[in-house]
Amino acid sequence: MAQPNSVKVLEICQIGPPPKSVPTTSLPLTFFDIPWLLCRPMQRLFFYELPYPTDHFKQTILPILKHSLSLTFQHFFPLASNLICPPQPLKPHILYTDGVSALLTITECMGDFDHIIANYPRDARDLHPFVPQLNPARVLPDNTRVVPLTSLQLTVFPNSGICIGVPFCHVAADGKAFHHFMKSWASICRKIIKGDLDCIDSNSTLLPFHNREVIKDPNGLEPNFLEEWWNWASTWKEDTRLINDVLADKVRATFVLGQAHIKRLKHMITSQCVDKELEPLHVSTFVVTCALIWVYLIKSQDSPVSKFSDIDNDELYYFNFVADCRNRLEFPIPSTYFGNCLAICFVSLKRCELVGENGIFSAVKAIGNKVRELESGALEGAEKWLLDWKEISELGHFVAVAGSPRLGVYETDFGWGRPKKSEVVQIDVSGAISLAECGDEDGAIEVGLALSRENMDNFNAIFQHDLNLL
């Protein structure tokens, strides 16, 4: 029997820039790109209400989406390109040649659209049929690996909506760059729907900036990162388990932290600083949200049995996030720079500090101090980014953040209105949390989680109880 959210493939095609519109281009990887070479593909879904039958979608909407995508790839060609990984000591790079394209799959789903985009806990496997696979890497005779960097899937829910699914390799783009691509595609699509033939101005200040020479490397990070990547890649083994086995006991849900709750949380932290006669902390929406979720995640892992077991309260727990460096470095980088430009940040606290009476305050202090440090030196400690990532991820007790409330996910309007829901699917496997601005309330934050059913129940109980006390 077919699963409720199984999809029927209607069409498979390749979409790239218009022929002869982009010259052969090789883009070197900077030290900002190299740490993401072994990262799992990012997987983003956008759901839109669209009350039309499948035939209308295929005949009217699909041709515009294809055409606008091709025009968008003309300017965002790295995503339609390949990652070229020659044998050591040659450096990997991104290569575009005329005719290279991305896989586009068109599917139909008869599942319950409203259930799929709901916030309440659902089977973590529900969203995976809407994420296409990246084309497998090719290995050339000289052992050079050729890796496609993105693919796309359009899924129509007859008379309900559509889903746009895009996995992409992080080495090609960070979140800001990827959402620049998505918003540009959406903008071109809107203009075509309105009959505007000048879909994109070639002199527009909103076009992506591809010149990698703007990234300076005063600390000589690139050769060290390459050496560490080669060493890591030589021992790295791909997880070959089936997704159904990995996610069999997991559910995913979206929790909304309202603007009023965030304001009260900030006030609570600020008041504690005054009461303790401490220097004011960095109390941004991002910081207090991350602190709150980190503490609740640790608490949700406690079971009636574990509370009486030998838990090491002095063990370190880690929190990881990234920070955009486009406006944080001594050398200027355009805001439209296309690639990676992220500082990788880690903070740690003992378990007893996180689950204690002042756990949220301690977490805000730790995360806020790290954010504040970025302003004086975004690359401070960068030489340890890869080594720290490897060591901490192997230790466990590790929470990472995917996405950001500043990416403007819900501004991606193709001409049918804002997305009804956007999801970051890779958190089902990576164990990260996802953050985005709320699609329904200004100033609110959406937090996406994928946990075991027991942990999700525990987290939900803690979240609802504590928010009622704020």
Image (spheres, grey):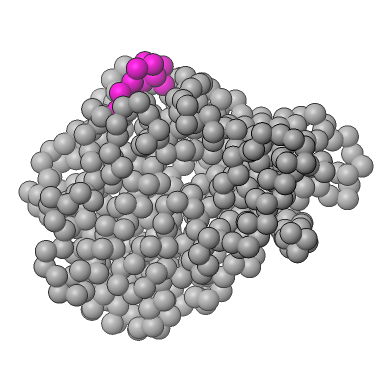
Nearest to the observer: residue 19 or residue 49: 49
Horizontal and vertical percent position of residue 235: 50, 24
* Residue occupying image coordinates x 63% and y 56%: 263
Nearest to the observer: residue 11 or residue 179: 179
Q: Is residue 82 visible?
A: no
Left or right: where does residue 259 sit relative to residue 97?
A: right
Query: Quarter of the image holding residue 449?
Result: bottom right
Q: Which residues are magenta?
A: 215-225
Horizontal and vertical percent position of residue 303: 83, 49
Q: Is residue 186 visible?
A: yes
| Magenta segment includes 458 | no
Nearest to the observer: residue 46 or residue 363: 363
* Residue occupying image coordinates x 30% and y 23%: 216
| Magenta segment includes 222 | yes
Left or right: where does residue 326 sit relative to residue 290?
A: left
Is 302 situated above or below 416? above
Left or right: where does residue 281 sit relative to residue 313?
A: left
Instruction: Report the quarter where the C terminus lies.
Output: bottom right
Instruction: Report the quarter where the N terminus lies.
Output: bottom right
Residue placed farthest to the left in the image?
20
Query: Quarter of the image holding residue 226?
Result: top left
Is 440 situated above or below 132? below
* Residue occupying image coordinates x 61% and y 50%: 289
* Residue occupying image coordinates x 47% and y 62%: 422
